[in-house]
């Protein structure tokens, strides 16, 4: 058996940072997702039906597009009983748009 967790993010919510405890697939179910991974120079915009693989130990930043986003997280290999993803507060980056940063 595998566990799938579903999340919804609204447009205008601050970006969330997630530390990946085990390999995950991020699957966009509805809307658009902005995704960036620490150490990767690219940002990704994923639409409904698209997915992205996150490696164990990665820190991924996620935010919703204009109409919000519904996404699922699925363990991709080395499946355990639970999906463990730790939410982290974003650092105070001066180059980030203010609406992406929580205080």
Image (cartoon, helix red, strand yellow):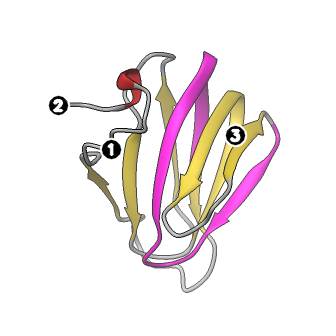
As drawn, 97 above or below 66: below
For image coordinates 56% across by 76% down, the residue present is 55
* In front of the other: 31 or 99: 99
Residue mark closest to the camera, 2 vs 3: 2
Q: Please identify the residue farthest to the front as the structure is shown.
A: 94
Q: Place residue 30 in its image quadrant.
A: top right
Q: Place residue 28 in its image quadrant.
A: top right
Circle nearer the N terminus (2, 3): 3
Task: Give the crowd class for mark 1: few <14, some 14-19, many >=20 residues within 10 Å.
Answer: few
61 magenta-colored: yes
Residue beneath disc 1: 93
Measured from the top left, where is residue 98 in percent x and y? 36, 24
Residue beneath disc 3: 28
* In front of the other: 80 or 59: 59
Q: Are marks 2 and 3 in contact (CB under 8 Å)?
A: no
Measured from the top left, where is residue 40 in percent x and y? 60, 66
* In front of the other: 54 or 7: 54
Helix, strand, or loop for circle 1? loop
Q: Please identify the residue farthest to the left as the structure is shown.
A: 103
Marks 2 and 1 sit apart, C-alpha to C-alpha, by 11 Å
Residue mark closest to the camera, 1 vs 3: 1
Residue 47 is tagged as none
For image coordinates 43% across by 27% down, the residue present is 97
Residue 103 is tagged as 2
As drawn, 79 above or below 30: below
Measured from the top left, where is residue 37 in percent x and y? 54, 60
Circle nearer the N terminus (2, 1): 1
Helix, strand, or loop for circle 3? strand
Type of secondary structure dominating the magenta stretch: strand
Q: Is residue 78 left or right of residue 51?
A: left
Helix, strand, or loop for circle 2? loop
**Which residue range is magenta in the image?**
49-72
């Amino acid at each position: 058996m595998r566990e799938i967790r579903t999340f919804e993010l609204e447009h205008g919510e601050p970006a969330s940072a997630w530390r990946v405890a085990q390999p995950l697939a991020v699957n966009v179910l509805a809307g658009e997702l902005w995704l960036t991974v620490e150490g990767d120079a690219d940002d990704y915009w994923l639409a409904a039906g698209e997915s992205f693989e996150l490696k164990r130990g990665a820190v991924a930043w996620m935010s919703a597009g204009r109409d919000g986003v519904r996404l699922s997280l699925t363990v991709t290999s080395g499946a355990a009983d639970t999906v463990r993803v730790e939410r982290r507060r974003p650092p105070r980056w001066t180059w980030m748009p203010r609406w992406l940063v929580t205080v």
